[in-house]
Amino acid sequence: MIESVYIENLRGIRSCRIEGLTNLNVFIGRNGAGKSTILEAIYLASSWSNRYDFLRSSSKMDYVVRRRCGRGDWNTYRDTLWFVKSIEEEITIELKFKSLNTLRFKILYESLLESSIFLELPEEVVGKTCPNCPIQPLYLAPSSNYLLDLKTRSSYYVGPNYFNEVVLKLFNDELKYLRDVVFLDSRLTVGDVEERVWKSLLDRRLDKLVVDLVREEFEPNVESIGFKPTTKGGFVLALWLPNTSVEVDSLGDGARIAIFYASTLALIKDTGVLIEDPEIHQHPGGLMSLMKFVLRVAKERNLQLFITTHSIELINIVRLLSKEFNLNMKVFYMERDHSSGVVDVRALEDIDVKVLQEIGLDPRLLHVV
């Protein structure tokens, strides 16, 4: 589990440190405070362990650029990730885990050793495993046989088994956690789920979990979900009802998003889940059903949740459900100084959120308190 995150020079954030992360973390704050950037930072760090996003069949770095620009890829629009486009500086993402191990990543504008993201290795590890290397933090690219000095751009060959013999021994659990991190946002499509998720669900009959969610809130008469032939010779995902079938892509936004999220969560375990604004298109009743599913699966499959929101309904729903599923929860209020880019973060325990509301204060509006 990740216990703290530190970021430098990413998006609108010059620097930000968030400590005391727990099972269930909810990020609130005004527009532009940096909430989504926290999710993107963890997602980018996970690209060192696993370059590709299995949900989108895309490189994670490409997707982080494209999800806001709507076009392009890492090579054409990566400058948009740098604070005030200061591409000569490195982006730093530091993750401290419950194991007390800290993984520090650097992202460079230019590609070196066919990569733009590098993992820092502690000086003591460098000294023991690379006698000819200078004793200072050196960096390893994914699947690389070389350590890199970012200051001089010098590289040092460490052999083909260095990753397995050194890095995995140091950070095996942490890298496994990062490998399977998923990012759930409103840009997921039915094609993503049909092509890359649903077959695995059917193989393990985990589709029953998704059907239960749909039946509870969105369509009480649904019998199953499966593939339906189309007139063009392909197949699409559809809800099977007593008297007809309905393509998932033609459902309301709330039902579709719930199916996408539930399908993905049913497949993963022992990792982190990044969820951006799950309240979008959701009636409070649907939001309750969706978050109940999310938290139940998180408890059963050891998932750490990172959720951004602008919704007081979601905050209160999650507070209630966290007690039901015995999950520790914190709300993090983020406030960014627009001139310096420094983000101040205030952690709110459940009792803090409760007391604020009892005295008539909205925790989302702490900037006016």
Image: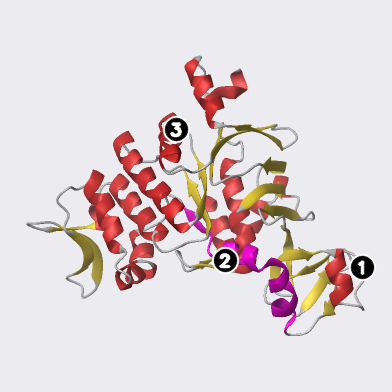
Please tell me whether residue 65 is drawn above or below residue 141 in the rendered image.
above
- Quick one: SS at disc 1? loop
Residue where numbered disc 1 is placed: 135
Q: Is residue 62 above or below residue 331?
A: below
Residue in the picture at 50% in, 24% down: 354
Q: Residue at x 65, y 42 (%)?
A: 20
Name the quadrant of the N terminus: bottom right
Amino acid, disc 2 = Arg
Query: Which element carries disc 3, helix, strand or loop?
Result: loop
Q: Is residue 75 visible?
A: no
Residue 304 visible here: yes
Q: Amino acid at mark 3?
A: Ser
Give the amino acid type for the residue marked by disc 1 in the picture.
Ile
Q: Nearer the viewer, residue 111 or 269?
A: 269
The quadrant in which residue 244 appears is bottom left
The residue indicated by pointer 2 is 179
